[in-house]
Image: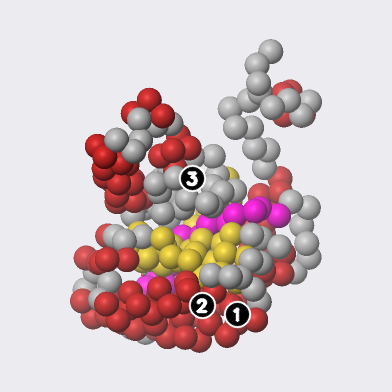
Amino acid sequence: MTKSIQIPQHIAIIMDGNGRWAEKRFLPRIAGHRQGAKNVRMVVQACRRLGVDYLTLFAFSTENWKRPRKEVDALLKLLIGFLADEMPEMLTNGIRFNVIGDLDMFPARVRSALIEGMERTAHLKDMVLTLALSYGGRDEIVRAVRHLVEKVQEGALPLEEIDESVLADFLDTRNMPDPDLLIRTSGEQRISNFLLWQLAYSEIFFTEVTWPEFDEQQFQRALEEYGRRQRRFGLTQAQILAGNDGGGR
Ligand code: IPE
Ligand code: IPE
Ligand code: MG
């Protein structure tokens, strides 16, 4: 893969379409999830090579718990296998493993495997791979607000001090920059409760290609498209071209 001009610091991906990939081939949906999990390795390696600092993958949403029990159980099993398979790769490549979402929702066995994965890689600094698991943007904001109100009630946080950066510090993504680029595979053009706060100014790339079929060439296309976007953050084009930070006048 050639290095494109502008590499996003943080890429987030909604890995969608595993089920449809499988159904089209008359395979059980879980075969699609298995294929999708394999594809994660490709995108992790490509990001590491390109110098992306943060890669955040939506792997299981708060709403996905409502899927048939059999599918949920198979996904949890796949997750444990993924973590075991990828751990050596992460350790060799300096990749810190991170999870966002409500870990309390997981069976203890899964939760401790995830925590162990985070602990074993906590010292690594070359890239952060975050899996969003039992993650919902609304749920994250509710958990953050509860925690914040608790601090206010304890007298540890004056109400007047609450601003955007204080609230952001209570989110699961504290210490992470907002995504520069969001990719969603498989044709759906919606956010589906992913990173609601953090995607405020992200560039969004939608593709018809399903996640198991999303290959390095497709990834390169997303990066090229990102390179052509002009991010304005509410300013005028003239201000951006003049290198103005929008401080007024
Ligand atoms: C994404 O693929 C993976 C998860 C949500 C766990 P889907 O399972 O949503 O696949 P489709 O959208 O049904 O094809
Ligand atoms: C979003 O995909 C969640 C993940 C990719 C993990 P869904 O398949 O759950 O989203 P909807 O239901 O199509 O919006
Ligand atoms: Mg889907």
Tell me which segment is drawn in magenta: 7-25
Q: Give the quarter the ligand 1 occupies.
A: bottom left
- Marks 1 and 2, how far apart in space? 8 Å
Counting from the top left corner in percent of width and height, residue 127 is at 62, 65
Residue at image x 57%, y 45%? 203
For marks 2 and 3 on the same chain, the one whose residue lies earlier in the sequence: 2
Residue closest to the eye, 2 or 25: 2
Q: Are marks 1 and 2 in contact (CB under 8 Å)?
A: yes
Quarter location, residue 55: bottom right
The mark lying in front, picked from 1 and 2, is: 2
Secondary structure category for the residue under label 3: loop
* Residue assigned mark 2: 120
Q: Relative to residue 176, is residue 241 drawn left or right?
A: right
Counting from the top left corner in percent of width and height, residue 42 is at 61, 75
Residue at image x 33%, y 74%? 111
Question: Which colour assignment does the render follow?
Answer: secondary structure
Counting from the top left corner in percent of width and height, residue 222 is at 63, 57
**Kind of residue sitting beneath label 2:** Arg
The mark lying in front, picked from 2 and 3, is: 2
Q: Is mark 2 within 8 Å of ligand 2?
A: no
Residue at image x 21%, y 65%? 66
- Kindly identify which numbered label has been placed on residue 199: 3
Residue closest to the eye, 146 or 205: 146
* Residue assigned mark 1: 91
The mark lying in front, picked from 3 and 1, is: 1
Residue closest to the eye, 5 or 24: 5
**Kind of residue sitting beneath label 3:** Leu
Secondary structure category for the residue under label 2: helix
Quarter location, residue 94: bottom right
- Marks 3 and 1, how far apart in space? 29 Å
